[in-house]
Amino acid sequence: MLDIRRLRAEPEIVKSALALRDPDLPQAIDRVLELDEDRRGAIGEVNELKAQRNAASKEVGQRKRAGEDADDLIAETRALGDRIDALDDRVRSVDAEIREILLAVPNEPHERVPAGGEEANETLSTWGEPRSFDFDPVPHWDVGERLGILDMPRGAKVTGSAFPMLRGAGARLQRGLIDFFLDVHTREHGYTELRVPYLVNSDSMIGTGQLPKFSEESYHTEKDGLWLLPTAEVPVTNIHRDELLALEEIPVRYTAYSPCFRREAGAAGKDTRGLLRVHQFDKVELVRYERPERSPDALEELTREAEVLLERLGLHYRRILLAAGDLGQSATLTYDLEVWAPGVDAWLEVSSCTNFGDYQARRANLRFRRAQSERPEYVHTLNGSALALPRVMAALLETYQEEDGSVALPEVLHPYVGIDRIQVPA
């Protein structure tokens, strides 16, 4: 969440930045500042009343030792105590309201972020060229169906629409991609691999910013009060929640594979065929804790680590800088990586790489200390999909399809999948 000290010091700057996301957000900041003034006034009055009560209590003792009546002072101390209790209740109520508002207010966009919505996103770079075909490429759902590796109807039968099922070489390809991604990140990029729980508590969802904003888009097990992962970012970022790390423990670099569950798939009524927009999908995630001064460079490094995978797979891609109106709730700056899928004739997002600044760290109380003599600071958190599987699979099947219906796999995947080509069944 936002730092209330910054709201006090530079309210107009913060409100101007947040207005790039939503013109109504400055009103929320005004309400927080109004409550904060009320809170500080109440705390100041409490301190004054406590001083009066202490003085009265001291005089009560003196009178009793002198054998004098102190009933008036005892009544006064009780009245002061009642007033203090009422003010303490007021402070707790105001604190809760401030927290509720700030949990819903998104992060400030970085100064590099362009104004506007999705239409204002900027293409920063492009790698490779789209493949030229001697035939008309078909969408991945047709490729997968004729190869017998993608079975959407049976996935829908056992669960519901937008729950894909992979068969045979399709399942092997997905498993091989996951292993390939994890091997590169752990062997070359210096990440520690984790196997995380696939259910998390509400504190974890609050820590990364999924709650309260995305409660309706997440799967909730009401009996246990747990949430199915929308992304491995949630458990991985929260591993060190409420901990104080030493300087030598920073940076923290974790990678984890997990299935991801999101209810909003297909809600917009578009891109609902095949693997383009699904409720359950696999993803390999990168998460970093960094010193604040290192987080801009760390975002460039993390994004490059995701790009390396696309280049080794030979997929034509571009890097996009998201505009303010297209940023996620917790993000201050985000790069999206999009691959070209010739069968659907479209760019598909396969990764979002984000710097959250200290926004998540304040929610999850993620801190470090540079030295024993110095005050704790909040880390900066970053994360990136490296990569999300469904659209990588879609782009691979469409890019490497052959006229006879087979799919030639990139050489880097041969040892992971055990074959160099997926053939049409005889």
Image (cartoon, helix red, strand yellow):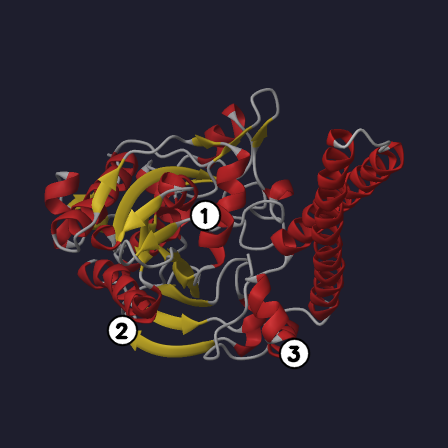
Residue where numbered disc 3 is placed: 12
Query: Can the viewer see residue 268?
Result: no
Residue type at mark 3: give it: Glu
Instruction: Say which of 373 and 404 sits in front.
Output: 373
Instruction: Find residue 127 and name its label.
Output: 2
Which residue is located at x 41 percent, y 72 percent? 320
Locate residue 61, reporting x and y percent.
72, 34
Q: Residue furthest front?
A: 66
Compute the Cα span from label 1 to label 2. Answer: 39 Å
Considering depth in this image, is 102 or 311 the residue closer to the camera?
102
Query: Which label's residue is closer to the chain start, 3 or 1?
Result: 3
- Residue type indicated by callout 2: Trp
Task: Farthest residue to the top: give it.
Answer: 223
Position above or below: 165 against 271 = above
Whichever of labels 3 and 2 marks the residue nearer the N terminus, that label is 3
Task: Give the x, y percent position of residue 63.
Answer: 78, 35
Q: Position of residue 119 (x, y in %)?
A: 56, 75
Which residue is rendered at x = 72% and y = 55% of the image?
Answer: 39
Question: What residue is rendered at 55% in x and 56% in y?
Answer: 1
Q: Position of residue 327 (x, y in %)?
A: 53, 65
Q: Secondary structure at mark 2?
A: strand
Q: Which residue is mark 1?
A: 365
Could you say which disc has been placed on residue 152 in the image?
Answer: none
